[in-house]
Amino acid sequence: MPGASSTSPGVAGAVDEPRLVAPPTRSWHDRRAVRLLGGALVPIGLLVAWQLVTAAEVFSPVQLPAPGAVLDAARGLVERDLLWQHVHISTQRVLVGFAIGAVIGTVLGALVGLSRFADVLLAPTIGALRAVPSLAWVPLLILWLKIGEDSKITLIAIGAVFPVFTTVSLALRHVDRNLVEAGRAFGLRGLRLFTAVQLPAVIPALFSGLRLALAQSWLFLVAAELIASSQGLGYLLIESQNNGRTDRLLLAIVLLAVLGKLSDAVLGIVERWAVRRWT
């Protein structure tokens, strides 16, 4: 048609003008400062409430010592060079047991998630063992492994196996079949297909399982240190209960909470790196 613009829609050779797309804006609650300050509000509030309750003598000092008494208990253990020994040995036990359990859980999860035969053969037994309480393992481990470090680390590893196994096996069953077929088209088989295609596809689920396993490892630590320990935060917890030292008992609880959160935060950093690297 005469007078029609050369850039009219539908005309061959028309050139679209570039559009500027605004970068996605971050929500206010995703900002680091907001998350740090927001996460600190509840602990600070609990600390203030703790101080007010003890100052008002709602509970006796034996039932609930003041925060200052707990700090004095920590100072006394530091001066005797005991506190860091307890922290060090407990952290070492948790990390070693967690690492062993995570590897075993990943291998079992991969077997069950990738093989129908392994699923039929292993899944019922692993599901039954998962329901066994942690303390039920203690007498058997003492009988088999005595009262040394092996029995404690084994118990922690048992606690770490099941969350990793569950998340990895379920995630591998739902990996995109087209992705797997594309890997096979490039000649990938067996272990190479698993490490190059299937495992990267389940990285988020794997780290969810690892974080659950790490929390479970700290939970199993106290049960592990029931096995004739003379060091560790679990030992400090039980020894304080037996001696009526509520200040040290609360100190052990606070340290377990802080160490658990710090280790989870470190694993969260590794998770973000792994997600950027492989997904």
Image (spheres, rainbow, N blue to C red):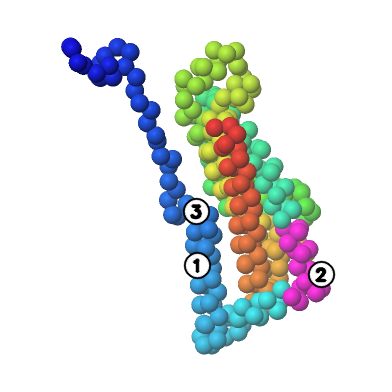
Q: Which residue is mark 3?
A: 31
Q: Identify whether 57 is placed above or below 32.
A: below
CB under 8 Å between discs 2 and 3? no
Foreground pick, 153 / 174: 174
Question: Please, what is the three-letter code of the amino acid marked with disc 3?
Answer: Arg
Foreground pick, 96 / 181: 181
Residue 90: x, y in percent?
A: 72, 58
Foreground pick, 180 / 223: 180
13 left or right of 148?
left
Distance of label 1 from label 2 (alpha carbons): 31 Å
**Mark 2 or mark 3, whichever is nearer to me:** 3
Q: Identify whether 208 is placed above or below 233.
A: above
Question: Please, what is the three-letter code of the amino acid marked with disc 2?
Answer: Asp
Q: Is residue 86 magenta?
A: yes
Distance of label 2 from label 3 (alpha carbons): 40 Å
Residue 150: x, y in percent?
A: 76, 49
Near mark 3 (Cα within 10 A), the count class, few <14, some 14-19 or many ≥20, is few
Report whether residue 153 is seen.
yes
User: Which of the 4 image quarters holds residue 101?
Assistant: top right
5 left or right of 68?
left
Report whether residue 129 is seen.
no
At 71% from the left and 68% from the top, the residue drawn is 236
Q: Is residue 48 magenta?
A: no
Q: Main secondary structure of the magenta part?
A: helix
Foreground pick, 23 / 213: 23
At 61% from the left and 78% from the top, the residue drawn is 67
Q: Which mark is residue 42?
A: 1
Q: From which residue to which does the magenta span run?
A: 75-90
